[in-house]
Amino acid sequence: MKKELFEKIEIPEGIEANIEDSTIIIKGPGGENKRKFEFQNLEFEKEGKYIKIGHKKATKREKKMINTIASHIRNMIKGIQEKFEYKLKACFSHFPMSINIEKNEATIKNFLGEKIPRKVKILEQVDVELNKDIITIKSVDRELAGQTAANFEAATRIRGKDRRVFQDGIFITSKCGKEI
C-alpha cells in the first residue's frame, strides 16, 4: 500500500548541513563529513534546522531506504559532535610483537615470531594513537573508524593453528564507547 511518508532529522545548533545533488555535507566544530547517497525516488529537503527525507507514494522499499539514510545522517551528525572511538588491545603470549605507526600505514613486527612484518592500512581522516599495547582509533566517520579497526584485527588473524593455544593478535575491546 502506497502512502505519504517523510522523516525529519534535527540539526543541532553549531552544525551546518548542505544538500548538493546527491551529496550531503555536514560541517561543525569537529570537522566535515561528506556522504553521497543514491536517492533514486526519494525527496531531500532542508527546512530550517531539519533535513526532511521522504516520498509521496512510499512502499516498503522506500521506507527501508528512508530509515537507512536517516540513521546514516544521524551518525554523521553524531561524529561531528563527538568523534567515534575504537580501542584495540595487542595480546601476545609466545612472541612479543611491536607496532609502529607511520602516516597511513602501521607495521606489526614479530607477530608469532614471523620475520616479515605485517602491514595494516590506515584510512584517511582516521587518527590512530598507540599507547604501549592499547591502540586508539578516532574519526568523525563511523565507517572509516570501524574499517580501520577491522584492518588491525584482520592483519593478525591466525589460520591453520589451534585458536585455544595460539591466542595472539590484536582485538577490539570497545566500539564507540561500548565495551565488548
Image (cartoon, rainbow, N blue to C red):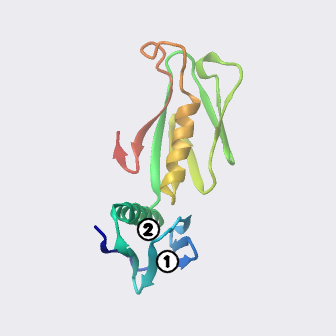
- Mark 1 is on which residue type? Ala
Reply above or below: 19 against 112.
below
Task: Please report the residue visible at 69 percent of the width from the left and 27 percent of the height from the top.
Answer: 117
Q: List the residue tagged with mark 2.
A: 77
- Mark 2 is on which residue type? Ile
Asked which quadrant contains residue 1, the reply is bottom left
Q: Position of residue 134 (x, y in %)?
A: 49, 38
Q: Position of residue 28 (x, y in %)?
A: 50, 73
Task: Please report the residue visible at 46 percent of the width from the left and 64 percent of the height from the top.
Answer: 76
In the rendered view, does 141 fall on the left or right side of 115?
Answer: left
Q: Position of residue 52 (x, y in %)?
A: 39, 78
Q: Position of residue 89 (x, y in %)?
A: 47, 34
Task: Please report the residue visible at 40 percent of the width from the left and 51 percent of the height from the top.
Answer: 176
Task: Please report the residue visible at 34 percent of the width from the left and 47 percent of the height from the top.
Answer: 178
Reply above or below: 167 against 64.
above
Q: Which residue is outermost to the bottom?
A: 48
State the separation of the CA atoms marked 2 and 1. Answer: 9 Å
Mark 1 neighbour class, 10 Å CA radius: few under 14, some 14 to 19, many 20 or more: many
Are the residues tagged 2 and 1 within 8 Å (C-beta)? yes
Asked which quadrant contains residue 8, the reply is bottom left
Indicate which disc residue 17 carries: 1
